[in-house]
Image (cartoon, rainbow, N blue to C red):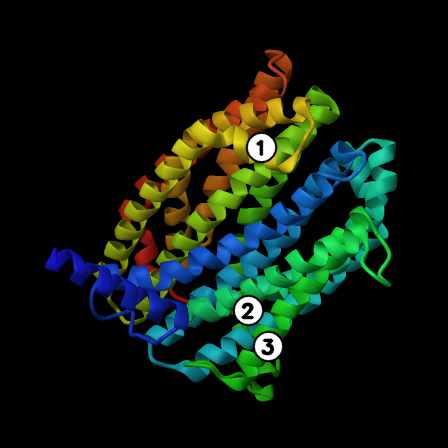
Amino acid sequence: MTAYNDKAKTFLVLLKKSLRGEEMDYTRGGIRRAVFMLAIPMMLEMAMESVFAVVDLYFVGHLEHSSQAIQTVGLTESVLTIVYSLAIGMSMAATAVVARRVGEKNPVAAAHAGAQAILVSTVITLILSAVGMIYSPQILSLMGGSPEVVKMGTPFIRIMMGSSLVIMLLFLINGIFRGAGNAAIAMKSLWLANLCNIILCPVFINGFGPIPAFGLTGAAIATCIGRSTGVIYQVWHLVKGNGQLKFLLSHYLPDKKLILSIIKISVPGTFQFIIASCSWIVLARLVADTGAEEGSAGYQTALRLMMFFMLPAWGLSNAAATLVGQNLGAKETGRAEESVMKTMKYNVIFMGVVTVLFFTVGHLFVSFFTNDLAVREVALKAMRIMSSGFIFYGMGMVMINAFNGAGDTWTPTRINFVGFWLFQIPFAYLLAVTAKLGPVGVFIAIPVTETMITLVSFVLFRRGKWKSIRV
């Protein structure tokens, strides 16, 4: 009993330290401790990111014409994955470069690299945001939205696309903090953003006092304000100088050599996720074409629930990126590889638990978000089929983040291109249209593809080319 109590006390002490964001040298000491200190706040950070879509889905799912509202949110999120891809690609580059500099014990160079990443991403995102706002109706129509969905959803998608810079900065700055090993600030920024969103969503959707009811559009307004609050919190900490990083105005002066280095890492990293995102968009269109409005709404509900549980796993796998980057910077390649294997073990356990939940109480999750029985039936079927590959998803996430943390963004990009575009899309079409399985064919194609991608990633990781990448 004494040994058990000691372990419990040690766990609580580490938990408090990780949530407070206490600094430690991740290139020394126990690897299990390092993974734990990074993974807890990173998992909670990603859980908070997933809450955004789930909160919106919950409130709009109880509006009149809920299936149209759910479809609008789902289709908009599918389009926004392109913005997310750019944001993740840039944050990936920032994490890799910042982590490498921190591992080399050069915090000034780390801050300078982070500032240059912010500079580049701001220019790119402003252009993308303007295009998205101008062509919002055409985008919804292209995605398969009915005329009613286009009419209802245009203000929603316009606001969401207009807030692309906020989305970008939220991802990017958190990537900078993660690279420096301060995952707690990244986590707290998402907590703050989500708290604002949860409070404001019902206010702007249903109206409160002098604030009129905006309906579906209110969800976009609340999300935009919530994310903006999180970004303000991040910027305050960058200027204040928490831990190893302190950003100065001089760090934002364009550094051509460093900008090119960041772009070199971020471009394949961005395409890596754009490839996956475009595949998801095609799958969403396939479901909309073969499953009608109820099929599309059910798929989007299942997808949001799936991402709600998968994003914490992605957060856990982010620990591998930081540990790989910092340990390669410290010339500890063996420790970098061992960190990845331990992180993968914990992620497999987590995803195994989620799989059991989806198969046993998945119907309760679905019923929480929609009262439409037809939508519930499709969503539950989609959840159970897609979750059959969750353990492989968990392994694959860690492999991808290990490559990216090392700055080897080309390897996952090539894997995604073959896996998603050359295999998943044709395979899903074959099952859904040719074999006439409809949406079920799309659901089956997802775990099959993810399993294949994971197996290929593992083989390439063991070959070890990532250890020699310079950033």
Mark 1 or 3 closer to N-term?
3
Q: Position of residue 141 (x, y in %)?
A: 82, 36
Label 1 packing within 10 angstroms: few (<14), some (14-19), many (20+):
many
Dot 1 amino acid type: Val
- Cβ–Cβ under 8 Å for marks 2 and 3: yes
Q: Hey, which quadrant is residue 297 in on the image? A: top right
According to the picture, the residue beneath numbered tag 3 turns out to be 235
Q: Residue at x 60, y 14 (%)?
A: 437
Q: What residue did someone put label 1 on?
A: 366
SS class, disc 3: helix
Question: Which of disc 3 and disc 2 is earlier in sequence?
Answer: 2
Residue lying at 85% horizontally and 43% vertically, measured from the top left: 137
Q: In what element is the residue under mark 2?
A: helix
Q: Position of residue 363 (x, y in %)?
A: 53, 28
What is the CA distance from the residue labelled 1 to the residue labelled 2? 33 Å
Residue under circle 2? Answer: 173
Location of residue 265 with respect to 390 vertically, above or below? below
Earlier sequence position, callout 1 versus callout 2: 2
